[in-house]
Amino acid sequence: MDKTAVPSVIFGPMRLPFLLLTPVCVILGAAAAYYGEGAFRMDYFLLALAGGLCAHISVNAINEYDDFKSGLDHKTTRTPFSGGSGALPRNPDKAHLAAAVGAISLAGTILTGIYFLRIWGAMLLPLGILGVLTVVLYTRWLTREPLLCLLAPGVGFGPCMVMGTDFVMTGSYSLTAFAASLVPFFLVSNLLLVNQFPDIAPDAGVGRRHLMIVFGKKAGAIVYGLFLAGAFLSVVSAWLAGWFPAWALACFLTLPLAVHAVIGIAGHSASDAALEELLPYMGRNVIITLLTPALLAVGLVIGR
């Protein structure tokens, strides 16, 4: 018996390197609460972070399990950014452990939400329900609808996570948190969009219908550029509206990287270039997705 099989099947589907996105989004929500009302509680922050990590682990594990059961894991070309961990095809008899990880993590998210509901009341419930539904429905149902598949990741990490964190700090919703949530909304939707480029044919083979399966790679590149523009324009708009301080514009430090990524991805979509030529742009896209909201969070804190 392979002694590494069980740890591989438990930790592989969690996609641990990808979990850095959660603290970035939770920190942004906390920064919005601090800028708006000077509110910050370390115990609430850590609980919100734990709930967010559980949600992220859950959607990763459920996605990996469902992709294994559908046969997609056997068809994809794995990259550092897409295609699954490969743990379940190597250990098919232990695939149920990935499903258990997804269920237990989801329970952790729900328990965290119940705790905050007891503190703040039912106003938090709509975001909580939206977040849980996004986790549960994403792979089996939302990936069958192009628009929902495009928007669901951004909704989970944007409004649900950023506004949720702001709410548990303050007990109310704010325009600052809403505007801040638009940055990960656009960027995380883009993150999943770009990661779908290598898997268009395999995804179509198991019944998925995301944007590029239905409309092609050029449409994906156009939406990618529009969503990147949306992320930066939302910051400018919030600053002009008085919801953000001028320091929030620090997130524009990633704009040159974003322009380069748009050009590279557009070029790839218009050609039959090898996957290896797309990988650098996928990596840059990850940096943009993490660094832009992080810089925005720093700007909100400094601008207080």
Image (tube, helix red, strand yellow):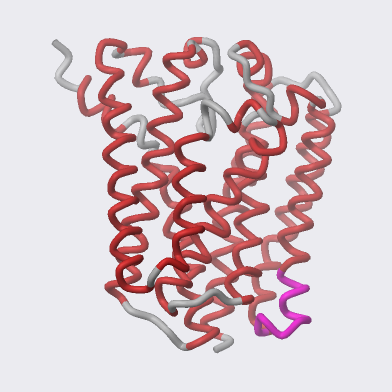
Could you tell me which residue is drawn at 31 percent across and 59 percent down? 114
Quadrant where the N terminus sits is top left
Q: Position of residue 283 (x, y in %)?
A: 59, 41
Q: Nearer the viewer, residue 158 or 128?
A: 128
Relative placement, left or right, of 128 versus 220 is left
In the rendered structure, does residue 225 fall within the stretch colored magenta? no
Q: Where is residue 295 in the image (x, y as percent from the top left)?
A: 58, 69
Q: Does residue 189 sit above or below 112 in this rendering? A: above
Q: Does residue 279 sit above or below 252 in this rendering? A: above
Could you tell me which residue is drawn at 34 percent across and 55 percent down? 51
Tell me which corner region of the image, top left, top right, bottom left or bottom right, holds residue 236: bottom right
Relative placement, left or right, of 36 versus 39 is right
Q: Position of residue 133 (x, y in %)?
A: 49, 43
Q: Does residue 208 sit above or below 139 in this rendering? A: above
Could you tell me which residue is drawn at 48 percent across and 72 percent down? 166
Tell me which corner region of the image, top left, top right, bottom left or bottom right, holds residue 103: top left
The segment highlighted magenta reads 235-245
Q: Does residue 184 sit above or below 177 in this rendering? A: above
Q: Which of 81 and 260 is in front in this view?
A: 81
